[in-house]
Image (cartoon, rainbow, N blue to C red):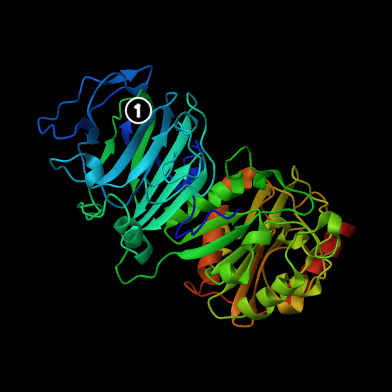
Amino acid sequence: MLSRRIWVAALMLFGFNTLVQAADSPSDWQVLFDGTSLDAWRGYGAKDGSLPEGWVIEDGTLARAKQAGDIITKQQFDNYELEFEWKISEGGNSGIIYHVQETENPPYFTGPEYQVLDNKGWNLEPTADTAAGSLYALYKPAKDASKPAGEWNTGRIVLDGNHVEHWLNGQKVVDAEIGSDDWNTRVANSKFKDWPFAKELKGHIALQEHGHPVWFRNIKIRPLAEKDAAADKPLRILLVTQSGGFQHPTITRKSSDLSHTEKIMTELGIKSGLFRVDCTKDVENDFKPELIKNYDIVMFYTTGKMYNKDQQLPISEDVMEWFLGTWLKQEGHAFLGVHSAADTFEDYEPYWDMIGGSFNGHPWGAGSTVTIKVHDPSHPAAAPWGESVTLKDEIYQFSHWQPEKVRVLMSLDMEKTDLKKPYHVPVLWVKEYGNGRVMHMSMGHREDVWENPTYQKSLLGGIRWLSGQEPGNAKPNPEVDAKENEIAKSAAKG
């Protein structure tokens, strides 16, 4: 199922510490606990900076070892993402409370809580509003993502102005907006209604002492970029990674984690501030007009057919007609196809006519070294690559190819690639589609391609163009196709 509303997307605390390395510098992060020092913490109400004796460093973890009060960060924070790992005892209960103001009352009087809990020990359904990962007593976890008592969980909290996200083991489980009508209604029906609850968007971070053993480790925080109050909200992208046919490893989920590609896109959106992404492998429930209308861009990394039941990507023809004929042709809407998006609905002409072509084999497999040339270095999607790039990836060739309808930005350089074929092989192209826009990026089979900083910059440039934030020529250039065909024929003959 879709990770519900993604005013921004999902992100990383999946213990995926190599994610988007080029876009994520260690200097971005401030370590709050690394297993060796408690200098960032003090007792709640302890103006002298002291720490309760019950909180100790135990085998590299921050542990509540015996009776103690809550502890808080010495600093106050706003607009940040907080990553951490936690482990709870059987029947244990704790929490991480944010936006905390020091008063005579406990931290939860002023701050919302990320619940840390042994669901089984409390006989709770994993989607109860006080279950692990919940925004305590207000928002239930959207899905069961917790691990049993005694096992380590990864957690993440994103606070972007009024927007709140809770992540648990790679899944976004809470998405809320402080001060919204929905939020205010929930608070009015809770025990928080008469308290100074969540009135400030800057405050301390508290670790709750609730009478049970609990352990934390690898706690770090980084600020989110400040936004102009008049600026638009981040774009919303629906990323579909469901496969009716072959499923690529980079979009295969393990356990409750997001896939490699989903993590990269989520992190890229948060880090850039450009977009937020919802990820789905359940198009029957999530690819519906009433949901799609909330997005700016729909992104496919998919396989499957329309009519073949054995390889069907279960989006109905009626919905696809609406999507292609109405939604996508509206100004401000766009489609981003990645790699096997062209290996989708090859039996459904309106789709391949929209995207520009259909998968017709990949003579250049995942281990092939290829050189790709850039035809339009002024376009924001192609500019990061310079004049050309040599790398390893699986490269598709296409049927239903329509050079008169697309602008080719990058192609396989047949003269510099070992396996030579006597025809043009486009790699990146764009097109106008009604008042909407379309881009297809053929690269993306391999995980290391997704980790490539230039690939990420290319996607970001493409998304900016798709959304109209950066100019770029989309006029069809069939002359490039004709020229590259001749070059390829000559190279293959030679």
- Eyeballing the image, is 487 above or below 457? below
Residue 133: image location, x then y, percent? 44, 42
Confirm whether residue 164 shows in the render.
Answer: yes
Judged left or right of residue 85, residue 427 is right
Judged left or right of residue 196, residue 396 is right
Give SS at disc 1: loop
Badge 1 crowding class, 10 Å Cα cut-off, few under 14, some 14 to 19, many 20 or more, is some
Nearest to the observer: residue 192 or residue 457: 192
Marker count (numbered): 1
Nearest to the observer: residue 139 or residue 21: 139
Residue 182 appears in which quarter of the rendering? Answer: bottom left
Residue 155: image location, x then y, percent? 43, 39
Hey, which residue is sitting farthest top in the picture?
A: 59
Say which residue label 1 marks.
34
- Eyeballing the image, is 39 above or below 460? above
Residue 135: image location, x then y, percent? 38, 47
- Residue at image coords 55%, 74%: 472
- Residue at image coords 52%, 60%: 460
Hey, which residue is sitting farthest right in the picture?
A: 493
Residue 130: image location, x then y, percent? 41, 42
- Residue at image coords 60%, 58%: 239
Hey, which residue is sitting farthest left in the picture?
A: 48
Residue 227 appears in which quarter of the rendering? Answer: bottom left
Q: In which quarter of the image is the C terminus?
A: bottom right
Confirm whether residue 375 shows in the render.
Answer: no
Q: What residue type is labelled 1?
A: Asp
